[in-house]
Amino acid sequence: MNRCGFVIFGHCGVHDYDDIQDIVDNIGSLHDNCDFFVNHPTVKHPKIKTRHNVGPVNHSSFIFGAFIELVKSLTEEEINSFDHFCLVSANQYFIRPFDYEKNINYVMFYNTPNWDSDYTGKDFSTDIKGDPLTQPYGRWDQKDMHKVLNVPTPMASNWEHMTLTRESMLLCKKHIDVCVELYPNQDMISLYPGFMALLTGQEWKFPPFFGTFDPSCPNKNWILTQEQINEKFNEGYVSVKRVNYKKDCPLKTYIKKEILKNEQ
């Protein structure tokens, strides 16, 4: 497998050492050439890289603060030792191994002007239609960061299971101060990392990730069901959300006993 660094954003109000270790074990059992960068403000764990306080609820605005700390703390040598970096949310779980292709970014870009109504899942067309920065609810990038950084075909994106090439991460490190100066104290997780993936000029694909919140989920149920897990496994998805945060989550137990028994 290509070497992947999994960036885990722990939940500071819920996760303890065992919960963090369970996520590490879940991913590590499926990927033999990887390492971990965990954000958690208090837990003592050997894979803790940053201690940004993400707040009692795992909001994306706090995720970006941790992301800023990570890209600033990583050296170019460290970044170059990986092929990819995969962003993992606190209530996400992996259901099969996946070998991320070199020089390809996996990003859930909002690539149509009405993406919330259009997106049908990981096999959705990557064709870019119209002006995708403008969605029915408003326009992304009000300060035109994409023009400052010369980002081609700019689009917003979902950060969960976003998997960036090392070239994208190097650009994240290079331009992070531009982003922070343009948008101080603002949530840019849905713009900045994806912009850097586009800036590389590399190919991108939708990640094989399913969340109960995304437009391809008709019911928008908060927590996954076993039926959804089975369905998404059979459809070739790699990770799913939302499971519960704790290690003893019944859905995590089901995935370990029934889904992963032939995958490890």
Image: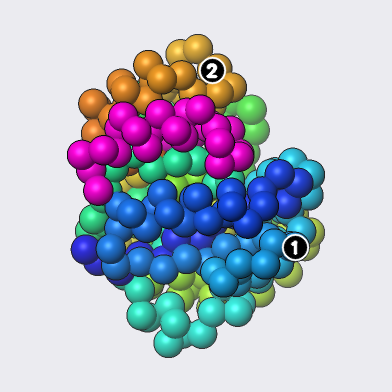
Considering only vertical position in the picture, is 11 above or below 85?
above
Specify the quadrant that holds the N terminus.
Answer: bottom left
Element under disc 1: loop
Q: Residues within 10 Å of mark 1 (few under 14, many from 20)?
A: some
Instruction: Please tell me in which quadrant of the rendered image residue 111 appears.
Output: top left
Residue at image x 46%, y 35%?
A: 252
Residue at image x 44%, y 60%?
A: 6
Considering only vertical position in the picture, is 140 above or below 213?
below
What distance separates the C-alpha of mark 2 from that of mark 1? 32 Å
Amino acid type, label 2: Lys
Q: Earlier in the sequence, mark 2 or mark 1?
A: 1
* Apparent side of residue 17 relative to residue 149 in the rendered image (left or right): right
Query: x and y percent of residue 137 in the render?
Result: 64, 28
Query: x and y percent of residue 28 in the render?
Result: 37, 58
- Is 248 magenta? The answer is yes
Considering only vertical position in the picture, is 91 above or below 47?
above
Residue stretch in magenta: 240-264
Residue denoted by label 2: 220
Instruction: Please tell me in which quadrant of the rendered image residue 103 appears.
Output: bottom left
> Closest to the observer: 204 or 9?
9
Residue at image x 61%, y 77%?
A: 72
Residue at image x 35%, y 66%?
A: 34
* Apparent side of residue 15 relative to residue 21 in the rendered image (left or right): right
Which circle, 2 or 1, is nearer the viewer? Answer: 1
> Closest to the observer: 244 or 148?
244
Q: Which mark is residue 221?
A: none
Q: How many marks?
A: 2
Amino acid type, label 1: Thr
Residue denoted by label 1: 42
